Image: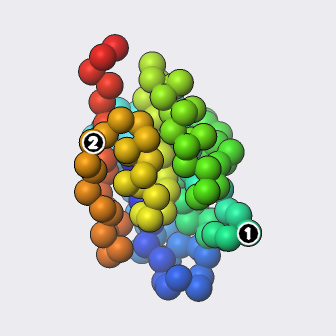
Amino acid sequence: IIRHGEKLNDEVTDLSPKGKARAYCLINVFGNNGTYATPEKIFAQSPSEKKQSTRPRDTVTPLADALGLEVDLSYTSGQVKKLSNDITDESENIVLISWSNDNIKEISEKIGIENPPEWDNDVFDEIWMIHDDST
């Protein structure tokens, strides 16, 4: 799980220049021969009437393009339970989730992590790796 890249402020819905640079760096982190395993599916928070930000999608689009994947935008910030159910169904696959920080703890809880920490408002560079050891 990652948080979307940096933003200018809460009123602007797209990434800042630093956030755009971070999005392209994810190719080195998750791409072929990257630091971490290459995702087989990428989910990103979809813009909605309530949360119009495109930052979660924009953060993973360069990586998805490099890998030949579509970004799954099926879920808005209010559909965390449905997202979590689908992620659980994808347990055989390596999944990357790009989301706003205010829902990351809830997503983690719903997929079985006990007492995950809050994601701080000023943190844009953490990666939460969650492994299913039961498979």
**Identity, as a three-letter code, of the amino acid under mark 2:** Glu
58 to the left or right of 6 = right
- The residue pinned by badge 1 equals 49
Say which quarter of the image contains residue 110: top left
In the foreground, 102 or 29: 102
Q: Amino acid at mark 1?
A: Glu
Q: Is residue 61 visible?
A: no
Specify few, some or many for label 2: CA neighbours under 10 Å numbering under 14, 14-19, or 20 or more: few
What kind of element bears circle 1? loop
Does residue 109 sit above or below 118 in this rendering? above
Residue nearer the viewer, 53 or 50 = 50
Q: Residue at x 32, y 25 (%)?
A: 132
Label 2 secondary element: loop
- The residue to which callout 2 is attached is 114
Q: Position of residue 21 (x, y in %)?
A: 44, 67
Quadrant position of residue 86: top right
Q: Which quarter of the image is occupied by the C terminus?
A: top left
Tell me what residue is drawn at x 31 percent, y 40 percent.
113
Report the Cα–Cα distance between label 2 and label 1. 31 Å
Q: Nearer the viewer, residue 67 or 129?
A: 129
- Outermost residue on the top side: it is 135
Q: Quadrant of residue 92?
A: top left
Q: Position of residue 100 (x, y in %)?
A: 48, 63
Report if residue 108 is visible in the image.
yes
Left or right for 15, reference 71? left
